[in-house]
Structures are given as structure tokens and as C-alpha cells.
Image (spheres, rainbow, N blue to C red):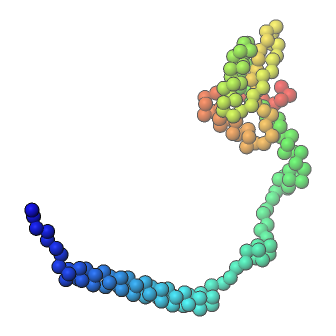
Amino acid sequence: MAKKQSTSPWVWAFLLLVLASFMALVLFLDQQIAENGAQDNQQQASTGSANKPTIDFYSVLPKRKVEIPISEEDREGIDNPSINKEATDRSILQVGSFQSANEADSLKAQLAFLGLQATIKSAVVNDETWHRVHLGPFKSDSKLSRAKNLLIENKIKYIERNPAN
């Protein structure tokens, strides 16, 4: 049988001494960091309050006023919103006209997948029934622009019409 080698007690003593030294170094550095941090905070508190102005958002904001120049034409539209409403409610996009109701329904479904709500209106032209697919009327110019952009992106042709037509 092989003889076991035992470790010398001096090796254990040396390892304990190194470990204790390392622990003492960590505690010393931790104490130095804490002291330096406290001194920095005191210096910032004493110099920071004298140099930096304090701004209270809720007291400063009501005192500020910005005048925006508005033309007379725009002011009439703001004062009377029905002027703007009449102008935007007149926009309708005709997306298609089909003799087959199934083709009109198919296009209406395709538009629904794009997030657009279409209606189908039937009309008799030269003793033939045509099914027109319409979008609108639009309540705002931004909704009208969004619809036009979606149609262009998906390569769908349209005609802009007045609802009276």
C-alpha cells in the first residue's frame, strides 16, 4: 500500500495568514470608499446648492405663454368647426366598379384585411347593374391620407369623388 502524505501544519498556517490578510485588505478598502463617498456628498451638498438654481415646474409653467400667429382664414375654421367638417366629409374614394357582386365582395374583404371599411353601392348604368366599392366619407384629412397611402402601397387604384356624384 502506498503511504499517505500528510500536509505540514506550516502550510495550513500560511494559508490562514494569507486569507486573513486578504480579508483585512477588503475591509480596509471598503472603509476608505465609504469615507471618501461621505466627503464627496458633503462637498456636493455645500457647493451644489449655491451654484444650481432650483426650478419648480408647477410654478414656472403657468407664467409662460407662447403666442402662435394664426391667419384669419384659420381662425374662422377654429371658431366654426363646421367649416372644416364640411370640407373633409366630401371625400369618398371609389376603389372599384364591378358587374359581379362577388368581385365587389372580394375587394371589400381585401380592404377589410388592410383595416379599411368599404361599402358597396349598386347603380344601374345603361340597363346594367354595376357594384361600386367605396371608402368614406372621411372625417379628417389624416384618415383620407392614410387610406390613400394604404391603397398605393397595395397597388390598388382609386378615384376620389364627391358624395353628391
Which residue: 82% across, 13% down? 124
Residue at 89%, 54% in the rendered image: 79
How many callouts does the rendering have? 0
Q: Is residue 124 above or below residue 39?
A: above
Query: Taking the image as drawn, is residue 57 in sight?
Result: yes
Q: Quadrant of the N terminus?
A: bottom left
Horizontal placement of 90 versus 16: left or right? right
Q: Quadrant of residue 45?
A: bottom right
Q: Position of residue 95 (x, y in %)?
A: 71, 26
x 74%, y 23%: residue:
133
Q: Nearer the viewer, residue 81 or 69?
A: 81
Quarter occupied by residue 107 = top right
Query: Quadrant of the image for the C terminus?
Result: top right
Residue 18 in sight in this render: no
- When asked about the image quadrant of residue 143, the answer is top right
Residue drawn at x 66%, y 26% is 110
- Residue 78: give x, y in percent of width and height: 86, 53
Image location (x, y in percent) of residue 68: 78, 63
Residue 67 placed where, x, y %?
79, 66
Name the residue furthest top: 127
Q: Nearer the viewer, residue 140 or 1?
A: 1
Q: Is residue 120 left or right of residue 32?
A: right
Q: In front: 78, or 15?
A: 15
